[in-house]
Amino acid sequence: MKKELFGPMMLFLYGIALIFAAAFVHYGWHYYSLPLLERPHHALHVLLKPGGLYGHGLGVIGSSMILLLFLYSARKRHLFGLRGGRMSHWLNVHIFFGIIGPVLITLHTAMKFNGIVSISYFSMLAVMFSGILGRYIYKQIPRNSVGDALSLEQIDMQDRHMTQKLVNEFKISPEALRTIQQISGAHLAKSKSGMGALFAILANDLKRPLLLKRLQNVLRAQNLRMQPAVFQQILRTAKQKSLLMRKRAFLDSVDKIFHYWHVIHKPFAYVMIIIMFLHIALTITFGYRWIF
Ligand code: HEM
């Protein structure tokens, strides 16, 4: 699918899914807010209990989404003939299922957590939240437009290309070039490793709006006679360059952190999936079939 269509389509799907979830919570609010012992007397109990028509349906759809998100792993390893599509798109779909699946499963539980299956539920939440951190770390690795990590040579080539553009085409001053270097935070990479590096990156991201303002002032002070559109182009290239410099400088640390993140993220995913299968097998054994 074309890159320009993919973003709006994902936004649309998030919109639909979240509106549906919000409407559903609104519909069942009175039931969900009752103590567990009083729920069986509520008119919506037959529909909203985990084994009810709606509750069970949400469980089936939510766990199908969880299973589907593993297609990302299959695509990454070219299993089952999966080779097509940008990795960045596959990851975005993985994230969609990884957020919406747990939302639907939460509604399926009707906020009733007990027994061994609750280990699966809380492992799912742990994977989901650790996924958000993983996504942040993933973004710190320079990638091409299809989502493949760039080699050091490719990163350096991109950096040189941007420097040439800024100096030769846009004629920015050596001071502006130094400011780009300073705001990148790349100099911090020498003294930081492990979690220290991650916090330094996070701090740099939080400070970025202020740092970019400083860069804007330095560029303005140069008094280059140019159209606003060209100024914006310079600013965009300068931002991209400073970010790339930071990613390049922290790459070793980020690679290590990302490796350890996988080591934590994956086992939770496997615990969750094994218990989920046991739970499904047990409910089928006990005769629950939903609409089938
Ligand atoms: C229940 C929900 C989720 C499960 C079971 C799950 C499972 C997994 C698994 C098994 C992997 C390893 C893929 C591989 O290397 O083969 C993975 C990778 C990843 N997941 Fe999730 N995930 C979930 C939710 C999320 C969410 C919500 C996000 C982001 C907001 C996320 C972001 C990522 C990222 C960035 C990677 C690394 C991609 C890579 O290294 O290529 N995940 N996930």
Image (spheres, grey):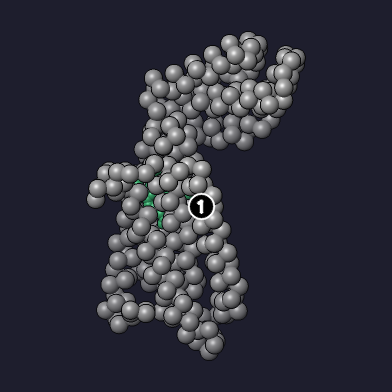
Secondary element at tag 1: helix
> Residue 212 occupies which quadrant of the picture?
top right
Q: Is residue 197 above or below residue 136?
A: above
Residue 201 appearing in the image = yes
Q: Does residue 161 appear to the left or right of 286 in the view shown?
A: right
Check the picture and name the quadrant holding the C terminus. Answer: bottom left
- Between 184 and 177, the one nearer to me in the picture: 177
Q: Is residue 133 above or below residue 256?
A: below
In the rendered image, the residue lying farthest to the bottom is: 41
- Between 277 and 62, the one nearer to me in the picture: 62
Q: Residue 53 placed where, x, y %?
A: 44, 80
Q: Does residue 230 appear to the left or right of 75 in the view shown?
A: right
- Between 133 and 218, the one nearer to me in the picture: 218
Q: Is residue 289 above or below residue 5?
A: below
Q: Which residue has dot 1 on it?
A: 9
Q: Residue 14 placed where, x, y %?
A: 53, 57
In the rendered image, the residue lying farthest to the left is: 80
Question: What residue type is disc 1 on?
Answer: Met
Residue 188 appearing in the image = no
The residue shown at (47%, 34%) is 140
> Residue 76 occupies which quadrant of the picture?
top left
Q: Is residue 51 above or below residue 123?
A: below
The residue shown at (50%, 52%) is 10
Q: Is mark 1 within 8 Å of ligand 1?
A: no
> Badge 1: few (under 14), some or many (20 or more) residues near its Cα, within 10 Å?
few
The residue shown at (41%, 75%) is 56
> Residue 227 occupies which quadrant of the picture?
top right
Q: Residue 111 placed where, x, y %?
A: 50, 71
Q: Does residue 230 appear to the left or right of 191 in the view shown?
A: right
The residue shown at (58%, 18%) is 181
